[in-house]
Amino acid sequence: MVVKTIQFMAENAGPWYDRLDDKEKALIATSTNRINHAISYVRQNGLPEEYHGIADKTADRLNVSHGYLTDEAVFALDNVIAMTVEDQNLYGDVISSVTTPQSGTKWYTKSYKLDEADINSTKTYPRPDTRFRDPVAFSLGVEPETQEGMGFSISYEIPWTEIAESNGSIYSPEYYYALKAAERMGVIIDENGFLGGAGQHMYSDFGLKGLLNHASIQSFTTSTPATYGNLRLGLKNGLIDLKSQYALGKTVLIMSSGLASQMWNNRFGYNDAPEYDSIIRELRPFIQEAYIDDRIIGATPSTGNQAWYLAKIGPTLQSRKLVYPLQSKPRMDKKYAEDISEVLIHGDVLAQYGQSPFPVTGCTSLTTTDTGHLPNQRLW
């Protein structure tokens, strides 16, 4: 059992806390629990080497007293920021098995399609031959396909007067502002990963595509979702699209909340088990992971714009390079030295290699009974 090391008392948080709505206050409460877990981890396992002496460096950057921060507190806060991003970024989980740091700072990556040499312009397979004197061959294509990445940044500024008002407690404005910046960064990483510039909260469509809206994406049919059995049959149609993609990888289902809800709404009879049970029983062995994420719609969810996708994820199908892993940078354009002005940055490149059939298939513009009661999360 984790020993609680911090107790949150709203009356000690300062007037800034009173101005928050209930959702924002819940964010603070969740973060408190995470801080306790992180501090407990340090007490049991010790502080990671890179955090020794980090408090003094952070205090210099934030223009606060060196006695105000400890190495353990910085470690705990960094963990909370990272978890806050992860809460909003299911794409990172979906694509984690093919995510690696970028070697150097490059926003472009090249991939080549296979140049099939078979005379019938079909896939090349080994030719029967007991002497091995004339093997068939394929090679890289002549023209490479270039994938471009994108970076994002968000800043927050806190005047010294707000800092003074909070009196340096861990529930001070700089802590809350950092949480909100992390939350919104997670939303954007999620949208960009799935839809590129077509995400709902993008300032403009910058033209890049994500995992789920590549030009070569396949499509499958799902009949009326509210009819029992159609969801299961729709997923089978999607699996058929991926059947002849032999590359190694996991098969992942990403769906909007309305379709997830429909799995429980659909019943053969009043007292019968929901369709979810039959989907788990029949298809769970072939769909290794399932996620609910309304951001794959690219707009505000409604009953008439629900969507779901099946994607095969593997090292010969996609790669995601982290050009700039999530990090915080101080800004120098502050009004006063005691102000806090920080920027969160992140940047990555998603490469989807030339494959036939393409390892993603989707079905969109579906109508469900409701927009869904489950929040964005991993379902299995």
Image (cartoon, grey):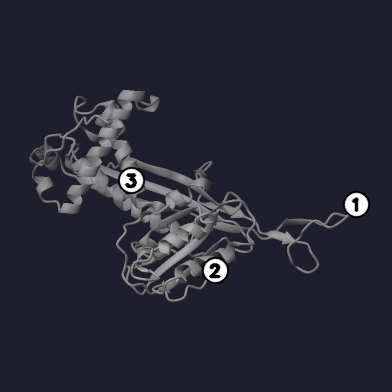
Taking depth in this image into account, of 345 and 320 the one nearest to the observer is 320
Give amino acid for label 2: Asn
* Residue at the image point whose x is 31% and y is 70% from the top: 370
Label 2 or label 3, whichever lies nearer to me, is 2
Q: Dot 2, crowdedness within 10 Å: few (<14), some or many (≥20)? A: some
Residue 32 is left or right of residue 189, and the answer is: left
Q: CA separation, marks 3 and 1?
A: 61 Å
SS state under label 3: strand
SS state under label 1: loop
* Residue at the image point whose x is 57% and y is 60% from the top: 359
Instruction: Name the spot of residue 153 as percent of width and height, x first.
Output: 35, 50
Q: Earlier in the sequence, mark 3 or mark 1?
A: 1
Residue at numbered disc 3: 344
Residue at numbered disc 1: 130
Question: In the displayed structure, would residue 369 be above or below residue 125?
Answer: below
Label 2 or label 1, whichever lies nearer to me, is 2
Instruction: Name the spot of residue 368 as percent of width and height, x first.
Output: 36, 72
For the N terminus, the image quarter is: top left
Question: In the displayed structure, would residue 110 be above or below residue 309?
Answer: above
The numbered mark at residue 333 is: none
Residue 120 is left or right of residue 319, and the answer is: right
Question: In the displayed structure, would residue 30 be above or below residue 317?
Answer: above
Give amino acid for label 3: Leu
Q: Dot 3, crowdedness within 10 Å: few (<14), some or many (≥20)? A: some
- Tell me how many marks there are: 3
Residue 275 location, quadrant: bottom left
**In this orientation, does residue 262 appear?**
yes
